[in-house]
Image (cartoon, helix red, strand yellow):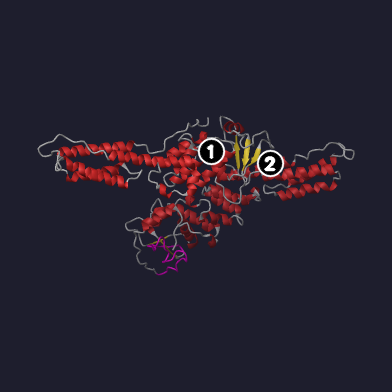
Amino acid sequence: MYHPPTRLCDSACIDILDFQPQPFNIQPGWSASSPSFGPNFEVSGTLPDITIVSGDRICYYAHSRFLLHSSTNAFGGLLRGTPPPSSLEVAEPGAALQIALHAIYRMPCAHLAPSLESTEGAIDALLAWGVDARALATPHSPLFSLVLAAAPRAPIEAYALAAHFRMDALAVAVSAHLLGFDTTALSDALALQMGPGYLRRLVEWHQMRLARLKEICLKPPAAHAPTPGCGRDDKGALMKAWAYASAGIVWEARPGTSAYQLRTSFEKAAAGVVCSECLTMLHARIEEVVQEWSLVPAPPDEDIPFGFGSLSQVFGPTFEFAGLLPDAVLVVEDQASFYVHSDRLSQVSLNAFGGLLDGTTGIAGPTFVVPESPDTLNITLRVVYELSCAHLSPSLDDIESVVNALIKYGIPLDSVTGSPDLPLHALILRHAPERPIEAYALAGHHGLESVAVAVSAHLLAYDTAALTNELALKMGAVYCRRLFMLHQDRLLALRRIVLRPPGTHRPTLVCGTGADGMGRLMRAWALVAAEVVWVASPGMSAQSLQTAFARPGRDIECIECLAMLRAHVQEVAREWSAVKVSIPAVFDVRRPLS
């Protein structure tokens, strides 16, 4: 039984549980069904209720509710009507239809090994059926993996397909296979398919790499101090050999020239050099060339979430801050580059950004290789620049990596979390509804006071008896005590509020002060109050209290007693709503970064 692994699919599967499959009628001329989408293809225990017949008469069995949930136009209008039809015929061939269904159901389809033409036909069909194909082509999804698998054998065609449908992450991943492609051989048809934007990005990326290669190679080795065996005139042999090797490399350079090719070409220059010190300077320069070329941005073998050419979409060469362009580059482990402003980093850091900005300078401006992942560095820099992270969805583990990076680079945590409108504060708080105790432990562990206060409001229903030693140790004794005190104080306040009975009215002919008069109201209130205190929890709602204390009114006949009861119930609800719902803030929080 197959269960699609996405939130969208899960909700769709819930819907189709109410749908009863109908028997299928195989029409004359229909061929056998698809192995993956046969009559017994289950989703969350539900069998198919619709047959889709391809243009070459192959049957595919699916779930109409699932297809409708995935579509914005009733599957191209084919599933309009109540109930939807039990069968429909489409013009697409089976090769394209099965790719489209695999993509919709998020089922792996690399084993199909279809042609790119079939994949393109499937994407065209998805769009016609109102399915967001780009949402189905996210990194590591079946459709993404299918196109990427074709890149080694048909890189430019796969790139043109990704570009045509504006699947940017897929275009980035495929472009890693285009380092050896000769852009002068690009046909008009492929250029039209990918469009001017992606064509320009491909050509400019190649040109940038070639220009950088030329710049690196043409810088000669440094000269050593004159010696008796090698004077100033004798060094000409080394420079001549280097210039000759550089000219050969630049003449035949390709964007995909490897570090091994560079090393081999320049080592040939050592054949005519006899001075040991010249050879030392030559080999040192070769190592510099290899290192500098390896830092030139090139898309990695896998996707990165920042855009074309391993450059962050935000932190690119044109990223302005305070009217200034970047003057430093941070390069992460997979060679994704982040262009930043050294003044900004120095301004917010207490340790010269982990010691990177202590005066060390690279070629054409400071370039620093950092060990963080692209996602971690992206969020870290967004926090430093106070840029929104609302569109990102990092896990709490990822957020903790960001916090550790901020500590490493000397960013005071209270300055980037001290206000609810700061990005890091908002990112942690987003996890509070679903993982409140973990988010609170993270905040407590790092002393994120304002975050801990905000998250604690989501812990009113948390059973502190279930708190593990690991989480208690992580949040620390102070924040652990404050959480327990919050629960204890709310329970004490609730007891104080509910144990105070309603007021009494003046005795009347029908309702005196005896057991059959106002005493009945007091007994009823006391019984409900005892029950509430017995089952009380810090997260009990005001609505629950109102419902519980409304019960005595069913047996009260005196109009004035009822009025006193209702007034007191409203007062109880108001008082309980006014009790503090979060731990008290006890530390002064620094102002945000400016």
Label 2 crowd (10 A; few <14 / some 14-19 / many >=20):
some
Q: Earlier in the sequence, mark 1 or mark 2?
A: 2
- Reply above or below: 97 against 250: below
SS for callout 2: helix
Q: What residue type is disc 2 on?
A: Arg
Front-most of 574 and 109?
A: 574
Disc 1 on helix, strand or loop? helix
Residue at coordinates 41% horizontally, 55% vertically from top-left? 10
Using the image as rendered, state which of residue 430 and residue 169 is in the foreground. Answer: 430
x%, y% of residue 499?
27, 40
The residue that disc 2 covers is 212
Q: Which residues are magenta?
A: 28-55
Q: CA distance from mark 1 to mark 2?
A: 28 Å
Q: Is residue 533 left or right of residue 470?
A: left
Please identify the residue farthest to the right as the structure is shown.
Answer: 228
Q: x, y (%) of residue 432?
A: 43, 44
Quarter in which the N terminus is drawn: bottom left
